[in-house]
Amino acid sequence: MVVRKYLNNPLKGKHGRPVITDVFYSDEGENKPILIFCHGYKGFKDWGAWNLMAEEYAKRGFLFVKFNFAFNGGTLEEPIDFPDLDAFGENTYTKELDDLEVLLDWMFSEEFPYSNIADLSNIGLMGHSRGGGVVVIKAEEDRRIKKLITLAAVSDFGDRFPQGEELAGWQQKGIAYIENTRTKQQMPHLFDFYEDFKANEERLTISRAAKALRIPTLIIHGTQDETVALEDAYDLKKWINDSELILLEGSDHVFDISHPWDKDRMSPAMNKIVEKTCEFLEN
């Protein structure tokens, strides 16, 4: 079996920046179910072991698609890490939802080069961390998505914003910074990010979308996640009617993976994620 990889394909975004996309699939079989993967905050499509994960799904018969959100701070020339911090600062939740729309519309267009091997009636959507919150909202909005998977997903965007004096200071300056502990970059956020959230708060309320979901959902969370509380997973399980929760005992927010990942295999936790998600998607 050969895994085909088509990397760094730029799709025209809605806001002047491309949605840079990878596609993985094996050379065996047709009518492949599609699985779309969304990275999280300060993330990117080539982080850690995501490529190993993509290859594994391809070997198991999926057409696997991962991408960089257009304003994640990467570029077509340098899709890894954050060479364009100005773009990172301009990102919003609604732009990320638009990026997913671009990806889905591409799949249903005449320009989609995999129509002859892909099953467009069988699309799964999977998101990690902040991307997990984004996919809950998108899955509720878009009937083209048939199954949903969240990995260490947040359950509330609003409570992750600063409050009080910190929020007022951000508004006054128009920009705030958070350090990337790995790269040591000062990552900017324009106050527009908060304003866009408030202007679209009903749409961006994850609990609202979760309660309205009518598709099977698999929620996966590590019990030692120090970034997104385990309560977020319990919230999603409570809100989503047709849902299953899998807790990975002792695993952290990134499922025991780091970046860069120079090993030739995934962590045991990531292997379990692939196993459990394939069972879920194939049933």
Image (tube, rainbow, N blue to C red):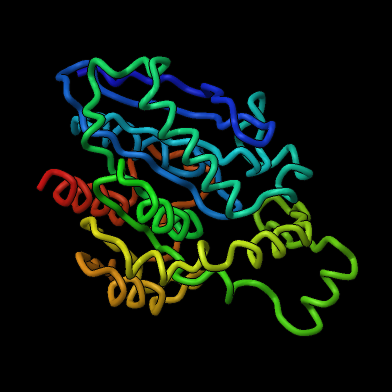
Which residue extends farthest bottom?
164
Instruction: Give the quadrant of the N terminus.
Output: top left
Which residue extends farthest left?
283
Q: Position of residue 190 (x, y in %)?
A: 78, 57
Q: Is residue 64 above or below residue 50?
A: above
Q: Is residue 109 above or below residue 187?
A: above
Q: Position of residue 176 (x, y in %)?
A: 80, 63
Query: Looking at the rendering, which quadrant does residue 196 occupy?
Result: bottom right
Q: Position of residue 205 (x, y in %)?
A: 49, 68
Query: Looking at the rendering, which quadrant does residue 250 occupy?
Result: bottom left
Left or right: 74 in relation to 229 = right
Q: Position of residue 114 (x, y in %)?
A: 32, 18
Judging depth in this view, the residue of 210 and 130 nearest the camera is 210
At 73% from the left edge and 42% from the top edge, which residue is drawn? 87
At 51% from the left edge and 53% from the top edge, which residue is drawn? 40
At 56% from the left edge and 41% from the top edge, which residue is drawn? 69
Left or right: 116 in relation to 233 = left
